Amino acid sequence: MTDGRATRLEQALRAAGVRVTRQRAALLQVIAAAEDHPDAAELHARAMTAGAGVSLATVYRTLTTLQAQGVIEKLEFQGEPARWEAADQTHHDHMIDVDNGAVMEFSDERIERLQAEIAAEMGYEIVHHRLELYVRRR
Amino acid sequence: MTDGRATRLEQALRAAGVRVTRQRAALLQVIAAAEDHPDAAELHARAMTAGAGVSLATVYRTLTTLQAQGVIEKLEFQGEPARWEAADQTHHDHMIDVDNGAVMEFSDERIERLQAEIAAEMGYEIVHHRLELYVRRR
DNA sequence: GTGTTTGCAAAATCTTTGCATGACG
DNA sequence: CGTCATGCAAAGATTTTGCAAACAC
């Protein structure tokens, strides 16, 4: 079975002048399959396990490229290496369990609205934002 | 004129078993005087300019210590070295102008409340959080 | 074909650390 | 004085980059 989403993505990338190399295709697969939030080293390991020869340098370059294309998003939690997630979902923020490192997603349009209001009041518009809740089970 | 705040802080540190060395006193001064959000290298430079001999390693160790004491807070904006600010103010979040790097502070109790609500609904309590708005003038 | 992308290894950046020496309380 | 802190230099961790060879379109 062919992965429809990956194929569509590849076409979009080509249309944007980004070459879909064997390495990039492999990383797209790995990212699409990820249900967590892996960092560069982890993505590299998964691509290698999947049989795709890719260098870590290429992983980094590819992540930058895919981010510029809006295909993936970069997450930078406190003091950890950057993590990545597919951007094909609806917007959400993250909640991190400080005891076990679990990362959960949540979204709240009231908060989104308030952020936009606050920025507007100060004469700005939001380009992007970052909201992370570091939490503990109660 | 003596700096009342710095003196009180030093007493609190000593009470907590933290020695107030010449280097730490100098850094406390520099941090108290800072009206911006300097990183370790910048704090080091300011301390040196002020005539205090301090090594960069000590600056890093001191920042870690002061953070553990709740005296300062660590800010980690996207892809920059960590910045620091005195913790003696009321809680606030940050807004960063993506065009010129200016960092502004803001606070909104409605957002704070919503965050706590969301965490509670999922069975968690907030240990700390991070909210950054990357903005552009409109 | 030809301009992009890759791999490798080296470098860059920021931060931490081991160990002998110095100094705070 | 005993213990904690400092300085130095070396190491760590993550990410970036120069350059020649390989590849996508």
Image (tube, coloured by chain):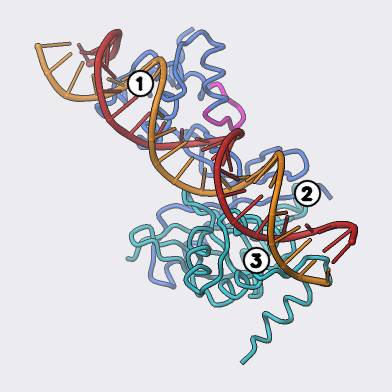
Chain colours: A blue, B cyan, C orange, D red
Residue B72: assigned label: 3
Q: Quadrant of the N terminus of chain B?
A: bottom right
The rendered magenta stretch, by its main secondary structure, is classed as: loop
Q: Mark 2 belongs to which amino acid?
A: Arg
Q: Is residue D1 placed above or below B107 in the rendered structure?
A: above
Mark count = 3
- Residue shown at the point (49%, 58%) measured from the top left: B41
Q: Amino acid at mark 1?
A: Glu
Specify whether disc 1 shares its chain with disc 2.
Answer: yes
User: In which quadrant will I find the C terminus of chain B?
Assistant: bottom left
- Location of residue B84 (image quadrant): bottom right
Q: Nearer the viewer, residue A35 or A64?
A: A64
Q: Based on the displayed image, in which of its 4 quarters is residue A38 positioned?
A: top right
Residue A124: x, y in percent?
A: 39, 66
* Label 3: chain letter: B
Q: Residues within 10 Å of mark 3 (few under 14, many from 20)?
A: many
The local secondary structure at tag 1 comes to helix
Q: Residue at x 64, y 89 (%)?
A: B2
Q: Secondary structure at mark 3?
A: strand
- On the same chain, marks 3 and 1? The answer is no
Disc 3 versus disc 1: distance between alpha carbons?
47 Å
Asked whether A103 or B34 is in front, the reply is B34
Reading the chain from its start, which is encountered first: label 1 or label 2?
1
Q: Secondary structure at mark 2?
A: strand
Q: Which residue is mark 1?
A: A10
Residue B43 appears left or right of B121? left
